[in-house]
Amino acid sequence: MPASLLDRFKNRRMILSPAADCSRDTPIAAVPDHDAACRHIRPMFDFWQSLLAALERIAMLPSLIHSVFTSLPSRRRMRDAVRTYDRTMDDLLREIQSLLESPLEPAKLLHMSGKLQEQFAPKLQASDICMLPSYNDTLPTGLEQGTYLALDVGGSTFRVAVVELKGKQPGAKSMRIVTMKSYKIDNIVRNLRGNAFFDWMAEKIEAALSDPQVQNLNGTKTFGMGLAWSFPVEQTSIRSANLLMMGKGFRATEGTLGQDLSELVMAPCRKRNLPVRIESIVNDCSATLLSRAYEDPSTRFAVILGTGFNVAVHLPVSALASSKYKGYPQKWLDQAEHVLVNTELSMFGKDVFPRTRWDEQLNDAHLRPDFQPFEHMISGRYLGEVVRLIIVEAVRTAGLFSGELPAKLEEPYSLDTGTLAAMELDESKFFTHATALFQSMHPLSKPPTHDDIHFVRQVAQLVSHRAAAFLAAGIHSLWKLMIHSEGLAPAEAGKIAIGCNGSVIEKYPSFRELCQSHLDELTTASGTEPNLISLEVAVESAIFGAAVAVCCLEE
Ligand code: BGC
């Protein structure tokens, strides 16, 4: 039941830190003796705290005291023992909770969905960066067959796979990855400018092709290649697309913006004499929709939520203005009833979702502020960053980690969303794993206390829950767009499945379930029967979809 899941989540989360908090310095290992230790330490600690507070109030001593007790770790501990903070951790947590949770009431989420729909209207008429139509009018039948080289350029990995599509068969999987190589896209690769990025891709394709298993599969034939591209593209045919602005910190568009992506990939491949030919280019989210529809014909949407965020949807052709189909062959225009649309939903949402001061800080420091406001609130690239910004404030103003900021956390984007997911998974009494993990990733001169870890976990839960609810509002807005353009009332809308791919929606604890609960609340509030839309995990769907896209083309 949606409501009970949400209630359970809230009850679990909203236990503020335990009352017996004699000192934030108490390490987890010392917890069993905590009460006894408190009886002795507390009066002394209180004495020093009040003494310093009095001095701070009456003299200019604070700056002197703080400058004397600064750098050395032992001095840093002393500084904490005598330092007063602007507020308690519980007060700060209450404020964070209120800022992050108050927008999540159904009425407010419905309002956000409505505002998003208002933002869609002009972009469906004209925009060369979002609401991008493809050349795919029909979805796959699930009977297509073939073996292809599939490329998936994601935000943090480039994958090259041989994919076999076998068509629907009773009791057997209809598609399989025969072999796959993954190459990490780190900051060095992200910073490669223009053609240097495509040279890097060709080098990795060559490495993948040199695998004897791949060579045995294809012999001397040229491989038909499908590319799933995790950025917007302007399709110029099913085989080609022009490069549009890339987010996620990539610089490959510098000097290449607007050029033909297929040629950008093929030129360095030709230089290396690689036996490949690009057959299809498709956005990764559209690829997810194609591959999920190959297995389940009720699929009408796909969501990707990993490093990046997007939604693809199969809409009536008439949902987009005719100017959006400039250059499309007349034959296509005559026969197509529906079209697969890459919404680039990440780019919507400015002034729709309420921003906290941490969201503002993130946006202000961003390479492309306001380019993808929705993505900044919900994707894996940013969840860790929002939590990091809150941690920095909590250390400085409320004494988290005894006032010591782990050195690495000074760096933007140094707190990995995966670390937070793993910490949330540890529901044990003393958070033993969460503590060990945090200390190994972000060492402190003394291990974090139980209260410290409790705080970080609570903040992570609040930030990820907000993301799940905002995603539900985003899906609801596109569902409303779809039924409206089909000429249906909510009560007439049929059940649909949404293929979901990406680390956050697939793996972040409780994320998909929470999003589903909010979505159920929103669709029933709009007048549908319950459980109309179901979020289904579509594992490896971007890479499968790259192959399905080539396959559809051969039909
Ligand atoms: C990109 C989309 C992509 C999504 C998921 C976003 O940042 O703009 O094109 O589909 O990430 O990878």
Image (cartoon, rainbow, N blue to C red):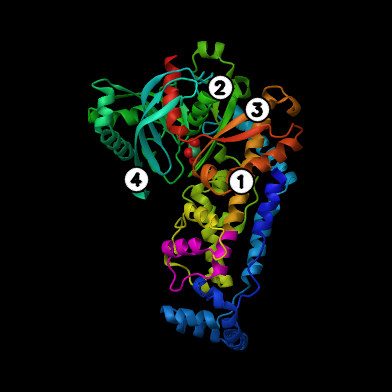
Disc assigned to residue 482: 3
Q: Residue at x 41, y 26 (%)?
A: 547
Is any part of residue 144 visible from this angle?
yes
Disc assigned to residue 468: 1
Q: Quick one: label 3 or label 4, which is nearer the N terminus? A: 4
**Amino acid beneath label 1:** Ala
Location of residue 306 in the rendering, given as x and y in whole percent from the top left corner: 49, 43
In the image, 114 versus 94, the foreground residue is 94
Does residue 278 sit above or below 384 in this rendering? above
Q: CA distance from mark 1 to mark 4?
A: 30 Å
Disc assigned to residue 310: none
* Residue pointed to by mark 2: 339
Is 438 one of the magenta-colored residues?
yes
**Amino acid beneath label 3:** Met
Circles 3 and 1 in contact, beta carbons < 8 Å: no
Viewer-nearest of discs 3 and 1: 1
**Amino acid beneath label 2:** Val
Q: Quadrant of residue 515?
A: top right
Give the position of the N terminus as an image quadrant. Answer: top right
Location of residue 202 in the rendering, given as x and y in whole percent from the top left corner: 29, 34
